Image (cartoon, helix red, strand yellow):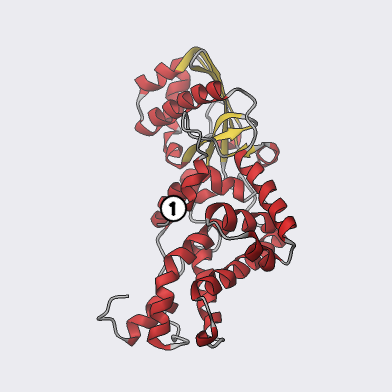
């Protein structure tokens, strides 16, 4: 908070218009933690609007206690925020909201709940944030149970000790470690090919995506095998488009027609092999499965059917030649 801001500005910064529960000094201390709280909440919830709501609720709960009795404000805020997020995740699971495959990327708006809350970012902010965290990571996190997601996010992404997480989840430390381990296995997945081949195929997938984003027909032709075949679920195509295309030029031109979706796409591990997820705002809409032979794509399929999407085993694809999981970047602040 700027040193020249008055009480009104302090209230807006801390509570989006709500009265500051502990005065300007407490509001300023809270603002010092806001970015990290929002980072944690976004990774737990996958929605910027919901993350802002969780941070706001944490601020309001701070007003119901005597802050002078809090030994570590940062730790207290993180614990309360995590409980708020856990409750929201459980409520979401009970409602069974947000089925995958609902709608097409070019028509998709922000995640359910409308636009960002007052004082939060725009849909463009959310798109940038999803990109920075990793669309594949957000997609996989949505497949975890609420307890697994909280354990993984807090421990693996923010290095919170298991003892603290166990108290939050009302589990033993050993049980909490198992939750995080299961989540970690889901996030990392299991490749069905040696590391060197996985890296080679990933580079082909990345070249395909890069050419699609640029609308570069020649680059697409270079990465497609002459006899390539593209199949697509009807729901993934504009009206009248052929569900099957054959030959490099026809497939390349068909890919460019759907090229606007490439800005929402990211490589992922799909059933143990390099593929692509299309996930605006981190919400899964399409998956591309690809067959790579001799350094070129010999076939690919666009899957939009909800039942088929639900049966896929999705994971974060490690970066080629680095040995570091792509989800490592998720711990970075924004």
Rendered residue at 46%/68% (across/down): 117
Residue in front for this viewpoint, 101 or 65: 65
- Tell me residue 235's x, y (percent): 59, 37
Quadrant that contains the C terminus: bottom left
Rendered residue at 52%/39% (across/down): 325
- Whether residue 118 appears in this view of the structure is no
Rendered residue at 32%/75% (across/down): 1
- Residue bearing the label numbered 1: 332
- Whether residue 154 appears in this view of the structure is yes
- Tell me residue 267's x, y (percent): 50, 35
Which picture quadrant has residue 305? Answer: top right
Q: Is residue 126 left or right of residue 142?
A: left
Few, some or many C-alpha atoms within 10 Å of disc 1 (few <14, some 14-19, many ≥20)? Answer: few
Rendered residue at 52%/49% (across/down): 282
Tell me the element at label 1.
Answer: loop
Q: Is residue 79 above or below residue 207?
A: below
Q: Is residue 284 left or right of residue 312?
A: left
Residue in front for this viewpoint, 153 or 114: 153
Task: Give the residue at the far left of this rendering.
Answer: 4
Q: Is residue 230 above or below residue 59?
A: above
- Tell me residue 263's x, y (percent): 42, 40
Which picture quadrant has residue 9? Answer: bottom left
Total count of labels: 1
Residue in front for this viewpoint, 87 or 182: 182
Q: Is residue 134 above or below residue 145?
A: above
- Tell me residue 64's x, y (percent): 56, 86
């Amino acid at each position: 908070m700027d040193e020249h801001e008055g009480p009104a500005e302090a209230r807006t910064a801390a509570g989006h218009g709500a009265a500051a529960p502990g005065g300007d000094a407490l509001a300023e201390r809270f603002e010092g933690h806001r970015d990290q709280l929002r980072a944690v909440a976004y990774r737990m919830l996958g929605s910027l609007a919901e993350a802002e709501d969780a941070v706001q609720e944490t601020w309001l709960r701070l007003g119901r206690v005597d802050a002078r009795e809090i030994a570590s404000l940062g730790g207290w805020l993180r614990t309360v925020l995590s409980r708020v997020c856990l409750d929201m995740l459980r409520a979401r699971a009970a409602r069974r909201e947000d089925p995958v495959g609902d709608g097409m990327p070019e028509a998709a708006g922000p995640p359910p709940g409308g636009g960002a809350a007052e004082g939060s970012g725009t849909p463009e902010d959310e798109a940038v944030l999803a990109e920075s965290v990793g669309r594949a990571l957000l997609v996989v996190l949505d497949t975890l149970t609420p307890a697994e997601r909280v354990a993984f996010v807090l421990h693996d992404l923010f290095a919170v000790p298991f003892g603290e997480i166990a108290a939050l989840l009302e589990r033993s430390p050993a049980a909490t470690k198992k939750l995080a381990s299961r989540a970690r296995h889901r996030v990392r997945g299991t490749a069905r090919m040696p590391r060197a081949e996985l890296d080679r195929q990933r580079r082909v997938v990345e070249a395909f995506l890069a050419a699609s984003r640029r609308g570069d027909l020649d680059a697409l032709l270079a990465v497609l095998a002459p006899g390539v075949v593209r199949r697509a679920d009807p729901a993934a195509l504009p009206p009248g488009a052929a569900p099957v295309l054959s030959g490099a030029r026809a497939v390349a031109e068909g890919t460019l027609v759907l090229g606007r979706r490439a800005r929402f796409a990211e490589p992922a591990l799909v059933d143990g092999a390099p593929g692509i997820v299309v996930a605006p705002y981190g919400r899964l809409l399409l998956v591309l499965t690809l067959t790579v032979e001799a350094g070129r794509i010999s076939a690919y399929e666009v899957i939009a059917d909800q039942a088929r999407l639900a049966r896929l085993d999705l994971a974060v694809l490690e970066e080629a030649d680095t040995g570091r999981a792509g989800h490592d970047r998720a711990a970075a602040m924004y």
